[in-house]
Amino acid sequence: MAQPSSFTAARKLFLATFVKHLFDNNEFVLASRNWNKYANTGSVEWTESGARPKSRRNGERGAATPKQDIKRSYSIDEFKTDPTILTWVEELVVSYAKRENILEEHIEQIREDIVMHILYKWVKGSKDVVIETTGDTKKGVDGTDAHAVTPDDFFDSQTEMDEQGVPDDGSRVAVVPASMMGDLRKYKDFHDRNKYPGMVLMNGAVGQIAGYNIFKRAKTLLFDVDGNPIERKTEGSDQEYQAQAGDSRTITLWHPKFVTRAISRKSKISLIDGHDGVEVSTTTIAGGDVYYSDGRGIITIREKKKAS
C-alpha cells in the first residue's frame, strides 16, 4: 500500500483537481460574489455595508452619524460522495489523467447537488418577484397545460430589474431549463451564439435576450403549487426529487453582484488505506445566498398553468 507521504501528496492533488472542476458546465454559478474567504466549517460570515449617507442641495450638512454596517451570515452544508476503492496511489500522484478519471464521477454527482442547492438558496432569499409566462400552450413538468415562455416575459423581468436599481451592464444572467430553451429559440429576439459569433457573452452562455446572458441546463428549480421554490435533489442523490402535480418549471435571473457562493477550505478528499486498496471519498462544504438582506437583484420566471 501507499506510504503516508504519497497519501499526503495525493490528498492535495485530488482536492486541487476536485475544486478546479467543481463548476465545469455550470459556469453560471461563477456569476456571483466569491465568498470562499468568509467560509468556515459550517457558515459564511461577512459585513454588509450599511445605508449610504444623505446628500443635500444648497442646505447645511446634517449631523454626523456612525455608519451602521449589517452583520450577515448563512449556513453551508456538507456534500459527501460514497467511497470508491482504488489501488496504486503512488501512480495516481504523478498521473494527471488518472486523477481526472477517478474524480470525474464524484465531481459530476456532487456538482449537481451543490449547483441546485445554491440556486435554491438564491431564490429562497430573493424579494419573491415572480413573472408568469404568457406564451402558447405546452405541456408543463407535471403533464398539465401551461404557457410557454416568450421574449416579453424577459422584457418584463428586465423592467423589474431596472426598477430595483440593478446595473444593466451586460452582466445579468438567466438560467433556462432545456424544455423552456426550446420555446425561446423560436423567437428572433433571442440572439443565439451560433448565429451571432461576434457577440460578447459570459463563458458558457449560449445566447442573449433582453440584456441577459442565457445559460442552458437540463433542469433548474421547480416551484410547487403554492409558488414556493423546491430544493430539488437530482438523479443519483439519496433524496432525488420527482415532479409532483402542480409543480412548475422556472427560469432564474440575477446580477452577479447580488448573489454569493462559497466553498470552505475545510472541504477534503478522504483516502483510507485498507486490505483491498484505498477508499477515496469527497466532502465538499459549500453553499450560497443573496448578498443584500432585502433580496433584490434576483427574479423568477415561472411557467403559468393554463386555466382548465
Image: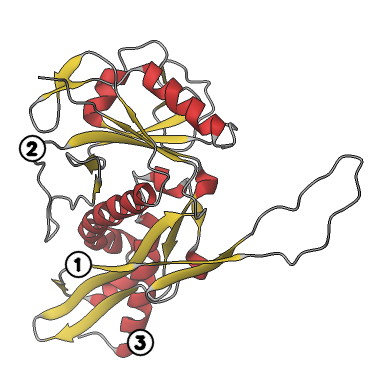
Q: Amino acid at mark 2?
A: Ala
Side of 190 where 180 appears, left or right: left
Quadrant position of the C terminus in the picture: top left
Q: Amino acid at mark 3?
A: Ser
Side of 52 where 202 appears, left or right: left
* Image quadrant where residue 205 sits: top left
Q: Residue at x 24, y 55 (%)?
A: 113
| Mark carried by residue 278 | none
* Image quadrant where residue 1 sits: bottom left
Q: Relative to residue 256, is residue 185 depicted above or below?
A: above
Q: Where residue 26 appears, x then y in whole percent?
A: 35, 45
* Dot 3 alpha-carbon crowd within 10 angstroms: few under 14, some 14 to 19, many 20 or more: few
Q: Earlier in the sequence, mark 3 or mark 1?
A: 3
| Front-lying residue, 188 or 87 | 188
| Front-lying residue, 63 or 162 | 63
Which residue is identified by label 3?
5
Name the residue furthest top. Answer: 188
Which residue is identified by label 2?
245
Name the mark nearer the viewer: 3 or 1: 1
Side of 170 where 295 appears, left or right: left
Mark 2 to mark 1: distance in Å?
A: 31 Å
Q: Relative to residue 76, is residue 210 depicted above or below?
A: above
Q: Earlier in the sequence, mark 3 or mark 2?
A: 3
| Dot 3: element | helix
Name the mark nearer the viewer: 3 or 2: 2
Is the Cβ of the residue at disc 2 closer than 8 Å to that at disc 1? Answer: no
Is the Cβ of the residue at disc 3 closer than 8 Å to that at disc 1? Answer: no
Q: Where residue 16 appears, x then y in whole percent?
A: 40, 66
Q: Relative to residue 83, is residue 233 depicted above or below?
A: above
Q: Earlier in the sequence, mark 2 or mark 1?
A: 1
Which residue is identified by label 1?
81
Is the Cβ of the residue at disc 3 closer than 8 Å to that at disc 2? Answer: no
